[in-house]
Image (cartoon, rainbow, N blue to C red):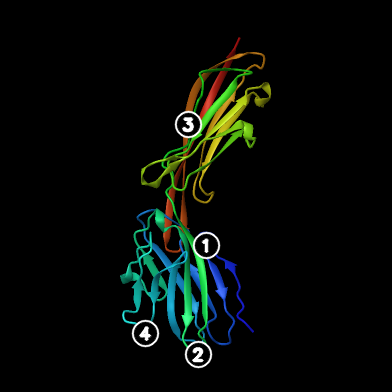
Amino acid sequence: MGPMFLQLVCCQFLTGLVWTLSSGGGLKWVRVNVPQYRVPGETALLQCDFDLGNDTLYAVKWYKEHEEFYRFVPKARPQANSYEVDGVHVDLSKSDRKRVVLHPVSWRTSGVFRCEVSAEAPSFASAQSEARMEIISLPEEDPIITGVEIQYQIGDIINLNCTSGKSHPASILHWYINEQQIQRPDALVVYPPTHHPMGLISSTLGLTFKLTEQHFRGGSMRVKCVASIAPILYRSDRESVVQSKSVPLREALLLGEWSIRLARFDVKSSSGHLSASLGSVLVTWAIMLVT
């Protein structure tokens, strides 16, 4: 009877796959613990845990995608060796049979990391587990809405652009009118991403629609742009509130009123934590319509 494998998904902040191997009293399972997110310049701790049962360890090998970058063989001298792989820098002084320390990480470090454990004779059993790590940079700026005119009237075509702060990977942008996400292709203008130094990217998404009386619910209209990378990591929005005092009136005089809200949270992993400060800027458009 051949080996049987069981795939499991690890916890919220660490993406891991666990393979179990049924082969009598020998090698039973291998499990990896890899940080899901890291920032350039940081240290990443990759952990490979396993249960050999009655077997004797022959080797532990680490791969990024399909390229081997670290090997630990107890009977070899030296026991640990690293191999050149783009974006992977192993700190051998802090690495052993069950952990590998990468420092520093860079954009090129992102990828799938796999640990393979093999036993000596007579079983020659082997098992592996893998997880993905992404190198990210969160935006330091809030999304910016541009294209706002000083005056509007019912029937005008509204043309707005929302640009995210610089990040890696690029932010995903969404527009909302009165809390309803706009998904119609004819209302959205998709621009190519803008690339900045250090591998950072900013996104821009346009919004175009005709201003009608139906947009004013309870005398106001809310237009909001939301930028996100991953809900767990980053979400920031900029919102505009347009207030209508009388429906039949035509011209709109824009008065700007700003208030800034800041929120902070931590994204934690087993080997550290990643902090992100999120800014939410609320732009209130106080619209006075006159004949």
Quadrant of residue 189 within the rendered picture: top right
* Residue corresponding to mark 4: 75
Q: For this rendering, which residue is in front, 3 or 40? A: 3
Nearest-to-viewer mark from 3 and 4: 4
Residue 200 horizontal side relative to residue 173, left or right = left
Asked if the residues shown at circle 1 and circle 4 are in contact, with their CB atoms under 8 angstroms apart, the answer is: no
The local secondary structure at tag 1 comes to loop
Rendering coords of residue 158 (x, y %)? 58, 24
Rendering coords of residue 140 (x, y %)? 41, 42
Q: Is residue 178 visible?
A: no
Decide: is 267 above or below 213.
below
Quadrant of residue 7 within the rendered picture: bottom right
* Residue corresponding to mark 2: 122
Decide: is 216 above or below 204.
above
Q: Mark 2 or mark 3: which comes first in sequence?
A: 2
**Disc 4 to disc 2, C-alpha distance:** 16 Å
* Residue corresponding to mark 1: 15
Q: Mark 1 or mark 4: which comes first in sequence?
A: 1
Badge 3: how crowded within 10 Å, few (<14), some, or many (20+)?
few
The local secondary structure at tag 4 comes to loop
Q: Mark 3 or mark 4: which comes first in sequence?
A: 4
* Residue corresponding to mark 3: 259
Q: Mark 3 or mark 1: which comes first in sequence?
A: 1
